[in-house]
Structure formats: structure tokens, C-alpha cells
Image: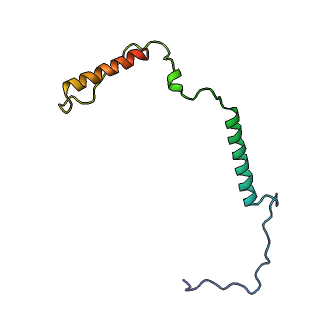
Amino acid sequence: MHFAYPSRKGSDPPPFRPRASRLPMLRRSRLKAIGVGVLALFGLLYLVTRPRGATNTAQQHVPSGQPPAVIVTVMDETGRYSKAHLDLVKENRKLYAEKWGT
């Protein structure tokens, strides 16, 4: 049989019992503060110990070995761009490949 209302609570509820914590001094707010402090410490250590000289690594990169081929492509050959423009793009890409050792 189904009852319309849940059963009533007793007149004598059990006494309030606070949560037992192993470390009562470490509340959630203190754990958050400790976590932020540890994260800030790691960030500071990273900033202090990182290498300082390499700011632009693209100019310092030297290709390893000699690749067997370079593929030169163009953007569009459907007639949207003129032939002179496509030849200029091809030549530019060939010069770039020669400059960077490929």
C-alpha cells in the first residue's frame, strides 16, 4: 500500500554529532589557500629557473639532415588568380625552401 505522506519523525531526534576530522586545523578554506600558495611557488620557481637567452627560436633553428624533397604548391589554379601571381607565389616558396636549407 502507498502512503501519501512519509512517516513522521520521532519526537526525540538523535543528538548532533560534529564531523570527526583527522586534521581539524585543515578546513576547506585553508586547503585552498595552501593550494594557491604551492601553485604560486611552482610558478615562481619556473620563472627563476627557465632559460633566458632563447626568445625567438624560429631564427635559431637549424634543420637536421637534408630532406629528400620539397613540395611546392599554389593556392588556386581555377582562374581566380592570374598566372603571373601564381608564378610569383611558386618562386617565393622555392626561395624560402632554399633559404632554410631544404
What colouring method underlies this structural image?
Answer: rainbow
**Which quadrant of the figure has residue 54?**
top right
Q: Which residue is nearer to you in this view: 3 or 22?
A: 22
Q: Is residue 19 left or right of residue 83?
A: right
Q: In this view, does 93 lie to the left or right of 31?
A: left
Residue drawn at 80 percent across, 61 percent down: 21
Is residue 71 at least partly visible in the picture?
no
Residue drawn at 69 percent across, 84 percent down: 9
Residue drawn at 28 percent across, 26 percent down: 74
Q: In which quarter of the image is the N terminus?
A: bottom right
Q: Which residue is nearer to you in this view: 28 or 70?
A: 70
Q: In which quarter of the image is the C terminus?
A: top left
Residue drawn at 54 percent across, 83 percent down: 2
Residue 38: % across, % down:
73, 46
Residue 64: % across, % down:
50, 15
**Which quadrant of the figure has residue 83?**
top left
Q: Is residue 12 left or right of residue 67?
A: right
Relative height, residue 79 to residue 61 (above, below): below
Residue 79: % across, % down:
17, 31
Relative height, residue 38 to residue 48 (above, below): below
Q: Farthest residue toward the left? A: 79
Relative height, residue 52 to residue 6 (above, below): above
Q: Is residue 88 left or right of residue 66?
A: left
Badge count: 0
Is residue 84 at least partly visible in the picture?
yes
